[in-house]
């Protein structure tokens, strides 16, 4: 957490220092004598150029709505970050907002995000994701593609294995995921359509002391899933809703005839609700459940801990066939482009509903800082408290 705060203070110092340097240069120019007028004018031209460059940089970070009227509202943000899971890293995020029918102001904006990251703990990742809203909302296309490699840890399958610290096993994980969902409009804000996803997973360099935790399963797994998706979405803005409801139900299958060695079906439900409670304050709720029936591999099971839910838990420490999790978050705008968020939540991983127990609940709470990178597109720095301690998350867009 301290490293992240130091980085933020360093950025602030740079911007403030730039303003101070410019002011001091202007004062020197005013006090110049007539005998050095030619030199002063030359210096003024140079200073004006430098001041213009500094002003452009400062304006880029001050004005969140600078491209709101353009056909494609594009923004780019490179910079360092820190996470307790992946270490100190250098990332890049490029995001764009656009409309497929600019003549219709009521049509919700489509969005695209491209990202890449590399960290000191050997984490390398690149990906793209987005949502396309077609004219008159007749169709909707959601997509995501990412690949990463990471030296990480594995505790085994099931809650009981996850809670044992001595089970921690080092291994290198390679993962590739692609998903697309094409939806047809059934009624206002209501969609139905096919969903297709593919995943490639590989575990290498496994610590010999923890090989038994994989329970003899393949270390390289390919998984192809196909199914049907239902969506109801009345949110006013996908990336940072102030009001509305989002309900999504995905029913997918990983059958053997599609080349799957591990066959299973998955029922996944997401319910989000948003409401403005006072000036600048939004109360957001999130419920998520994934129930898997069949024989999933170690890498296709439901996993607790991510940048969106049960924030702060080590990603995948707790894993099982199914998961149920919920959270409530209060988001408050504070000043100009700055805001804060606090949340509480909980979740469980389990093989079937009859195995759920209160003592297996994973509690979660946290606090975060929000900076408006562009109009209603936030950069977030969160710290999540967990039963094992806590963790830092740095990401773009709200958690849900």
Image (spheres, grey):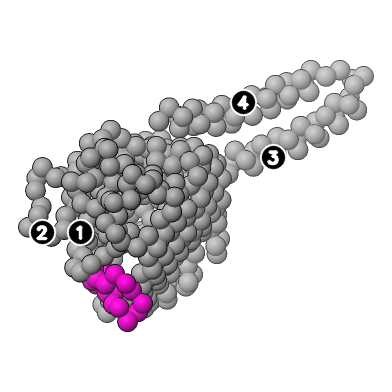
Distance Cα–Cα, label 4 vs label 1 = 52 Å
Q: Nearer the viewer, residue 240 or 162?
A: 162
**Quadrant of the image occupied by residue 321:** bottom left
> Pointer 4: what residue?
17
Q: Nearer the viewer, residue 144 or 177?
A: 177
Distance Cα–Cα, label 4 vs label 3 = 14 Å
The answer to whether the residue labelled 2 contacts the one labelled 1, judged by CB atoms less than 8 Å apart, is yes
Q: Residues within 10 Å of mark 4 (few under 14, many from 20)?
A: few
Distance Cα–Cα, label 2 vs label 3 = 60 Å
Between disc 4 and disc 1, the foreground one is 1
> Pointer 2: what residue?
353
Measuring from the top left, give residue 80's x and y in whole percent: 53, 39
> Pointer 1: what residue?
322
Looking at the figure, which quarter contains the N terminus?
A: top left
Residue 266 drawn in magenta? yes
Q: Residues within 10 Å of mark 3 (few under 14, many from 20)?
A: few
> Pointer 3: what residue?
53
Distance Cα–Cα, label 2 vs label 1 = 9 Å
Distance Cα–Cα, label 3 vs label 1 = 53 Å
Q: What is the secondary structure assignment of the residue under circle 2?
A: helix
Mark 3 / mark 1, whichever is N-terminal: 3
Mark 2 / mark 4, whichever is N-terminal: 4
Which residue lies at the image location 27% right of the left edge and 38% below the top edge?
Answer: 166
Which residue lies at the image location 28% right of the left edge and 33% below the top edge?
Answer: 389
Between disc 2 and disc 3, the foreground one is 2
Distance Cα–Cα, label 2 vs label 4 = 58 Å
Mark 2 / mark 1, whichever is N-terminal: 1
Give the residue at the far right of this rendering. 35
Magenta stretch, residue numbers? 248-267
Measuring from the top left, give residue 197's x and y in whole percent: 37, 70
Residue 206 drawn in magenta? no
Q: Is residue 342 left or right of residue 72?
A: left
């Amino acid at each position: 957490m301290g490293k992240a705060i130091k980085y933020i203070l360093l950025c602030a110092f740079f911007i403030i220092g730039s303003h101070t340097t410019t002011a001091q240069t202007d004062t020197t120019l005013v006090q110049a004598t007539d005998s050095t007028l030619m030199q002063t004018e030359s210096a003024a031209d140079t200073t004006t150029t430098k001041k213009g460059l500094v002003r452009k940089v400062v304006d880029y970070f001050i004005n969140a709505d600078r491209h709101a009227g353009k056909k494609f509202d594009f923004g780019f943000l490179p910079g360092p970050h820190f996470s307790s899971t992946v270490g100190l890293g250098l990332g890049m995020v490029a995001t764009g907002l656009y409309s497929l029918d600019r003549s219709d102001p009521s049509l919700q904006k489509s969005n695209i995000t491209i990202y890449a990251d590399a960290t000191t703990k050997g984490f390398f990742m690149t990906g793209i994701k987005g949502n396309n809203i077609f004219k008159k909302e007749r169709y909707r296309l959601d997509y995501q593609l990412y690949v990463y490699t990471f030296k990480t840890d594995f505790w085994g399958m099931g809650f009981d294995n996850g809670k044992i610290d001595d089970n921690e096993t080092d291994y290198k994980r390679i993962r590739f995921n692609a998903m697309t969902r094409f939806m047809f409009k059934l009624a206002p804000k209501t969609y139905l359509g096919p969903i297709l996803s593919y995943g490639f997973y590989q575990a290498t360099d496994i610590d010999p002391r923890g090989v038994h935790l994989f329970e003899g399963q393949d270390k390289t797994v390919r998984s192809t899933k196909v199914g049907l998706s239902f969506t109801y979405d009345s949110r006013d803005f996908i990336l940072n809703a102030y009001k509305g409801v989002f309900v999504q139900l995905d029913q997918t299958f990983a059958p053997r005839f599609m080349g799957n060695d591990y066959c299973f079906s998955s029922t996944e439900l997401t319910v989000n609700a948003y409401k403005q409670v006072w000036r600048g304050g939004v109360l957001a709720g999130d419920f998520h459940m994934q129930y898997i029936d069949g024989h999933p591999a170690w890498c296709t099971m439901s996993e607790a801990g991510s940048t969106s839910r049960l924030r702060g838990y080590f990603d995948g420490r707790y894993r099982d066939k199914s998961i149920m999790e919920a959270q409530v978050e209060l988001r408050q705008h504070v000043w100009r482009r700055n805001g804060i968020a606090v949340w509480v939540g909980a979740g469980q991983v389990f093989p079937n509903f009859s195995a759920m127990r209160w003592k297996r609940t994973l509690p979660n709470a946290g606090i975060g800082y929000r900076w408006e990178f562009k109009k209603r597109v936030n950069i977030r720095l969160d710290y999540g408290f967990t039963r094992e301690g806590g963790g830092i998350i740095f990401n773009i867009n709200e958690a849900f």
